[in-house]
Image (cartoon, rainbow, N blue to C red):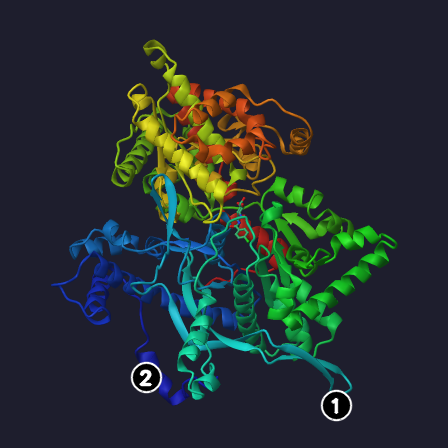
């Protein structure tokens, strides 16, 4: 209010209100203005990079205008907002998406062409915003796209890492990491908000005193301060004016930072200290589905949570409502347990700073939060050692003890004398040292807990969170099956397929209402439509082949079956089973007569994915894939019948090229281990079929597309426990085909066999991921794939039918479900 313009001056403002560029001419005018002013360049030195920067500045201006309108509208409407707290947003590139969503793709394309540039070349200049590891981070990116596209007032909150997920190179078959410093050329898609600075404290001590009203007051003081600075990333919705905000926090030293030391003449160490403040948001932790209890990681979590809550509360306070109405104005979704400290921080602010009674505060807290779980793997569940926690966040530790006390008292009342139950559900695990179980804290602090696919949501209720279902009843636990944004994963990644679909649907409305895909089902057997479908797949395969030629240096046959597995490398995702299968195929071909070879379906087996830098077994799998690739691709006996490719540095932009080119993609996790998977949805949406286990969202995909349009194999989740038990307590014979594969590895066919010892013995030993148990079934399914691919007619009709039935997997649908059953937020039309 203080900063607003006096009424007598407003006329001048209104006279010169900014307008967004309309047609091509105005875009070009803006483009040139940015070349000459923003970039201080000219017609004589404007390369593709400068042209990308100028174009993106022009588009950025437009997004900011829409962003301003949206925020003003949301403020005047004064409705409930949702805040999506995620430590990862795996956004990929912004420019193409911004043009598409703002509806200016055609004019910018034509505009830059007149100026002497190809839009494709400009798009290639942009580095990926790779602020995430894998599925969880990409889900957050799809979700904020959908929140904007469906007109919900919602913000994302995250960290502005200076280094995203590392870049991967393959050297001598091994993964080598290098840092991803993605901000070299500044980032046109962010707006620094230097005026929004929030102090965050760590360490220090707690103290309590009785105030004049006789109330006991807790204070936390004497700690180190750092500052959070906001960077805003506009998030444009597709086909709507709504442009939401993704606010990313960067850490900076406070202004008074170590003034004392500085004055005492210890200049160097004062600078060192201030650099330490900046390291908090410097780098993304590169683990997916693995928790490592590092202090810096907990610092990141609190830094981000404290800044975000402070910001949310500041906005709420402007409405002058009583605290009890906070949950009517604010919904906060916790993307996994990473932001769970927000539960404690909100309780602390309400009780310690705002003087709200404990019980009233706790009601506000639990009505505000929802928690999404993304895994049942025990090694991925966050548990912080109490001593570390206590030292960094002493007041939060006390509050957790109180939350736990009240919770356990409630449990004891409901289930008297069940001491075992109390120990099992306590937020504090009685190990040495004691540990804070973050998932339990998240459950207790939220009104809804959800899994991300049906099987996964059932599993959390019957395994890791069973006791909490007993305590709270089943209604607190629900399922929201993941989804993906069709804007990026259909229209942008596969423009030709999108155009073909539009020609039958009659418009591009399916990009907003994906169920309209159903309209192409009648054409599944239409020869003309089939031909066009096949031609587009072929085009996409050629595009990928060109990429492989450029980066791997060899040719692949685009008429071969493209078999793709791209995702983070993890034992539970079983890339090892895939490469063992490839070895089996290689050995079979080697044993064939020329006549037999004529019957073989030629295949290109494509792998991609990063291993966590410290994950030895995953790194060994990458090495084996590359070793097999080298041997197989050079073997004249095999020729075009089998090629093996490892695509280095798999990321969002590469996914956009790889996914539309697949005939088959593999989603072959041990049943019960992959919570959902989301690339499975992307592949099918692009006309590829799945070879997969009965796991995660494969199950719902099967239900939607029909059992005939997916290749399923392997043991079911319900048998996994028994099978593991058998391995542990008896000698289970190794699958005979797998045995032959291991003999080949051990005889040195793929180089020094010692490299693979631990990988082989993980299977010959306890085989925790049941590779041997599923191997025959896997080979059978692969055989069926080979046969069915020969029948081009049925294959293409299955592909079309599958796509036609993928409507359910839009992230717009997932967001509507969250909005309806967890957040209770309503959309707001902007204009
Ligand atoms: C990252 C850090 C930690 Cl400490 C734990 C987990 C992760 C992580 O990256 N998890 C992740 O990607 N989980 C995946 O989430 C997807 C979206 O829900 C699921 O589809 C996928 O099954 C799951 O593994």
Q: Position of residue 642 (x, y in %)?
A: 35, 25
Q: x, y percentage for residue 493?
A: 36, 44
Residue at x-position 62% and y-position 47%: 378
Q: Nearer the viewer, residue 128 or 106?
A: 128
Q: Residue furthest right?
A: 417
Residue 801 versus residue 483 in the image, above or below: above
User: What is the count of numbered marks?
Assistant: 2
Q: Front-most of 20 and 440?
A: 440
Query: Does label 2 point to a residue whose CB lies under 8 Å from ligand 1?
Result: no
The residue sitting at the left extreme is 44
One can see residue 241 in this view:
no
Q: Which residue is mark 1?
A: 212
Residue 671 sits in quarter: top right
- Is 754 situated above or below 187? above
Residue highlighted by disc 2: 12
For the C terminus, the quadrant is bottom left
Distance in Å between CA atoms under marks 2 and 1: 53 Å
Residue 820 versus residue 446: which sits nearer the camera?
A: 446
Looking at the image, which residue is at 64% across and 58% down? 438
Residue 269, horizontal then vertical, whole percent = 43, 78
Nearest to viewer (mark 2 / mark 1): 1
| Left-right relation of 204 to 591 | right
Kindly state the secondary structure of the residue where label 1 is placed. loop
- Give me the residue at 61% from left, 77% from top: 204
């Amino acid at each position: 209010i203080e900063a607003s313009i006096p009424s007598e001056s407003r006329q001048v403002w209104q006279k010169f209100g900014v307008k967004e560029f309309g047609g091509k001419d105005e875009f070009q005018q803006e483009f040139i203005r940015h070349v000459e002013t923003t970039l201080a360049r000219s017609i004589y030195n404007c390369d593709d990079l400068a042209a990308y920067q100028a174009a993106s500045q022009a588009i950025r201006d437009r997004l900011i205008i829409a962003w301003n309108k949206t925020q003003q509208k949301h403020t005047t409407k004064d409705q409930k907002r949702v805040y999506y707290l995620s430590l990862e947003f795996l956004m990929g590139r912004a420019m193409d998406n911004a043009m598409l969503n703002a509806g200016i793709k055609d004019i910018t394309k034509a505009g830059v062409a007149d100026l002497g540039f190809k839009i494709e070349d400009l798009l290639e200049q942009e580095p990926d915003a790779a602020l995430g590891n894998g599925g969880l981070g990409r889900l957050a990116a799809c979700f904020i796209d959908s929140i904007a596209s469906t007109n919900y007032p919602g913000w994302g909150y995250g960290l502005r890492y200076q280094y995203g997920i590392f870049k991967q190179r393959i050297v001598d078959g091994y993964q080598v990491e290098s840092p991803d410093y993605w901000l070299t050329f500044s980032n046109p898609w962010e707006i620094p908000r230097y005026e929004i600075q929030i102090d965050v404290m760590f360490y220090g001590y707690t103290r309590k005193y009785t105030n004049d009203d006789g109330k006991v007051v807790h204070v936390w003081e004497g700690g180190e301060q750092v500052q959070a600075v906001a960077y805003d990333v506009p998030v444009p919705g597709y086909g709507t004016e709504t442009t939401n905000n993704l606010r990313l926090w960067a850490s900076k030293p406070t202004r008074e930072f170590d003034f004392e030391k500085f004055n005492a003449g210890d200049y160097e160490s004062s600078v060192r200290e201030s650099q330490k403040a900046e390291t908090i948001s410097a780098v993304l932790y590169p683990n997916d589905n693995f928790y490592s209890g590092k202090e810096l990681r907990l610092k990141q979590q609190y830094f981000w949570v404290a800044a975000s809550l402070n910001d949310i509360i500041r906005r709420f306070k402007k409405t002058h409502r009583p605290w009890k109405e906070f949950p009517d104005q604010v919904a906060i979704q916790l993307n996994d347990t990473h932001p769970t400290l927000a539960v404690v921080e909100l309780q602390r602010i309400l009780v310690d700073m705002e003087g709200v009674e404990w019980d009233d505060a706790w009601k506000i807290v639990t009505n505000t939060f929802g928690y999404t779980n993304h895994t049942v793997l025990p090694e991925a569940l966050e548990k912080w050692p109490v001593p570390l926690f206590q030292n960094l966040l002493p007041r939060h530790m006390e509050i957790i003890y109180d939350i736990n006390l009240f919770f356990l008292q409630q449990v004891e009342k409901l289930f008297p004398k069940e001491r075992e139950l109390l120990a099992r559900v306590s937020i504090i695990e009685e190990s040495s040292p004691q540990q804070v179980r973050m998932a339990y804290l998240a459950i207790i602090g939220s009104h809804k807990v959800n899994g991300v696919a049906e099987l996964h949501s059932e599993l959390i209720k019957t395994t890791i969170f069973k006791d909490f279902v007993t305590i709270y009843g089943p209604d607190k636990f629900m399922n929201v099956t993941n989804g993906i944004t069709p804007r990026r994963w259909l229209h942008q990644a596969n423009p030709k397929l999108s155009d073909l679909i539009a020609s039958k649907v009659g418009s591009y409305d399916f990009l907003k209402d994906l169920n309209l895909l159903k309209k192409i089902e009648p054409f599944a057997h239409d020869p003309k439509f089939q031909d066009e479908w096949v031609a587009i797949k072929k085009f996409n395969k050629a595009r990928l082949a060109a990429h492989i030629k450029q980066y791997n240096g060899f040719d692949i046959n685009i008429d071969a079956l493209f078999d793709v597995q791209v995702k983070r490398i993890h034992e539970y995702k079983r890339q090892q089973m895939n490469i063992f299968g490839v070895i089996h195929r290689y050995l079979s071909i080697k044993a064939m007569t020329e006549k037999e070879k004529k019957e073989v379906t030629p295949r290109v087996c494509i792998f991609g994915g990063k291993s966590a830098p410290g994950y030895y077994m995953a790194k060994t799998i990458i090495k084996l894939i590359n070793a097999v690739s080298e041997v197989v691709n050079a073997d004249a006996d095999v020729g075009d019948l089998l090629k093996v490719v490892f695509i280095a540095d798999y990321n969002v932009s590469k996914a956009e090229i790889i996914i539309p080119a697949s005939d088959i993609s593999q989603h072959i996790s041990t049943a019960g281990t992959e919570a959902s998977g989301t690339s499975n949805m992307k592949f099918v949406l692009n006309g590829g079929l799945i070879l997969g286990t009965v796991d995660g969202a494969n199950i719902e995909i099967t239900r939607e597309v029909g059992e005939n349009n997916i290749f399923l194999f392997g043991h079911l989740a319900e048998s996994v426990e028994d099978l593991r038990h058998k391995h542990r307590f008896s000698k289970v014979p190794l699958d005979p085909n797998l045995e032959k594969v291991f003999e080949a590895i051990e005889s040195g066919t793929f180089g020094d066999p010692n490299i693979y010892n631990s990988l082989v013995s993980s299977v010959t030993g306890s085989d925790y991921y049941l590779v041997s148990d599923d191997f025959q079934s896997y080979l059978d399914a692969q055989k069926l794939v080979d046969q069915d691919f020969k029948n081009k007619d049925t294959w293409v009709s299955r592909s079309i039918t599958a796509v036609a039935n993928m409507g359910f997997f839009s992230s717009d649908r997932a967001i509507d479900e969250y909005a309806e059953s967890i957040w209770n937020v309503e959309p707001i039309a902007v204009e």
